[in-house]
Image (cartoon, helix red, strand yellow):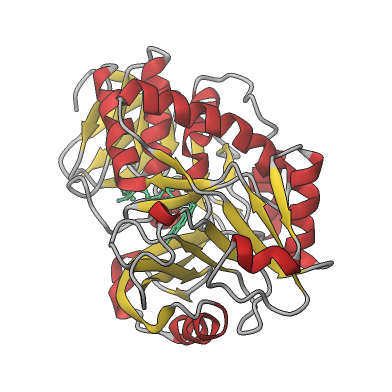
Amino acid sequence: MSTEVYDCIVIGAGIQGSSTAYHLAENKQKTLLLEQFVLPHSRGSSHGQTRIIRKAYEEDFYTKMMHESYELWAQLEKEAGVQLFRRTGLLVMGPENEGGFSNVKATLQKNEVPTVLLERKEFSQHIPNVNLTDGNGALVDTTAGVLYADRSLRAIQGLYQNNGGLIKDAEKVIDIKPGDVVTVTTESGAYRGKSLVITAGPWANTLLTRAGLELPLKVVKINVCYWKEKIPGTYSVSHRFPCFVQYNPKEAENVIYGLPSNEYPGLMKVCYHTGSETEPDERDKQKDRGDIDILSRYITRCFPGLVPAPAVVESCLYTVTPDDNFLLDCHPNYSNIIIGAGFSGHGFKFGPVVGKVLCQLAMGQVPSHDLSPFCIKRFQSHTKSAL
Ligand SMILES: Cc1cc2nc3c(=O)[nH]c(=O)nc-3n(C[C@H](O)[C@H](O)[C@H](O)COP(=O)(O)OP(=O)(O)OC[C@H]3O[C@@H](n4cnc5c(N)ncnc54)[C@H](O)[C@@H]3O)c2cc1C
């Protein structure tokens, strides 16, 4: 083992670990970012070309964090000199006076987020080729848009390295020894750090068990479906079609969301916001396509300009907590082991601000956001701490 002691070791080079490492290096911390696979890879949660960024949330605390996240994304874009964000707006639809739609509307109004409320009679004039369900309301969060995900990850890792940060990929962490100086063992070496950040995405539970902690995290496989436009361009980013989220669709219990056609010309991405449970290393053994049936029926009813059978299906993983809120906290027994996990399928847009607060925790500082909604102790009855 080398005698070198890092200020911080970060495990996992997805969006959350890479953003944390970026902030640590910015703060002159000697940082090592360890990744089990050769980079880039498509086995976790951060790969793919696009993600939605929005302030439209049911919970106030997410909307508030997004104010800063937008600023940090803009700063990253400037530093990297590449476009990471494209504004498209987000169309929110759902039963007018109940559930997700009315909660989002209230949060947007309370936080003075620029929003356009669409009356039913003018809906098709603003949003052609979409059928608004009877009894549904519609609004547009005009701040929202598309993040170029793969490009963002590359840019953040590049900026981290430019600031002196070290990445070692193809180094799977197999053991963690807590202490004032934490020892992290990989398949090819051992490293020591004054603090450790664990941002292992779908593998969080495997790794946390090695740090003596079991948390109620569930990994689900998402079928990422692309649907062909009957007339190319109908729902395209260049025709200013927005991202969308549909609360309480008639076809299912969970949310359906989509992004305008962009990365694959003529194909629009529309997905169901949940999937079937899987082991992260056995993702492709999970063959359930129940979500695709739901999406086909929804598309037939609401998006008549799409062929209701997917043209391309890719795979991605969510790591979900019981309440769908993130987990951002210190290990209950070791204040120098920090955990960022359970991003529940909506964490990408928060990458820069999550990275900032995890960096603050690793440096022993008071985090600049209230992290009480994200604490470990809310799962007390499900949590086992062995060490
Ligand atoms: C289909 C899909 C659509 C989504 N859409 C959106 C969206 O529109 N907007 C949004 O904000 N979010 C969205 N998300 C969610 C977002 O992408 C995730 O919340 C985010 O990518 C999670 O990042 P992460 O860094 O926690 O995990 P990951 O990206 O999985 O990174 C974890 C990393 O840790 C590494 N690792 C694990 N174990 C070890 C080990 N033992 N040793 C070394 N390395 C290890 C893994 O290999 C991996 O690279 C979506 C997710 C999916 C799957």
Foreground residue among 137 and 305: 305
What residue do we see at 66% from left, 68% from top? 247
Residue 67 lies, with reference to residue 296, above or below; the image says above
Task: Give the residue furthest to the top.
Answer: 28
Relative to 20, does residue 312 appear above or below in the rendering?
Answer: below
Say above or below: 274 vs 361: below
Q: Quadrant of residue 331?
A: top right
List the single residue furthest toward the right.
Answer: 97
- In this view, the residue in front, 11 or 25, is 25
- The location of residue 195, given as percent across then percent down, is 43, 26
Quarter holding residue 112:
top right
Q: Is residue 335 visible?
A: no
User: Position of 198 compared to 131: left or right?
Assistant: left
In the rendered image, the quadrant that contains the N terminus is top left
Q: Is residue 298 left or right of residue 268?
A: right
User: x, y (%) of residue 384?
Assistant: 59, 55
Q: Please indicate whether residue 39 sits to the left or right of residue 49 in the image.
A: left
Residue appearing at x 61%, y 84% in the figure: 251
Residue 258 visible (yes or no):
yes
Task: Estimate the x, y position of residue 26 in percent, counting from the top left.
Answer: 39, 16
Viewer-proximal residue among 166 and 270: 270
Placement of 144 over or under 303, stated as above or below: above
The reply, left or right, for residue 252 in relation to residue 274 is right
Taking the spot 62% from the left edge, 68% from the top edge, the residue there is 124
Q: Residue at x 64, y 77 (%)?
A: 249
In front of the other: 122 or 382: 122
Counting from the top left corner in percent of width and height, residue 165 is at 28, 22
What count of labels does the image hold? 0
* Quadrant of the image occupied by residue 135: bottom right
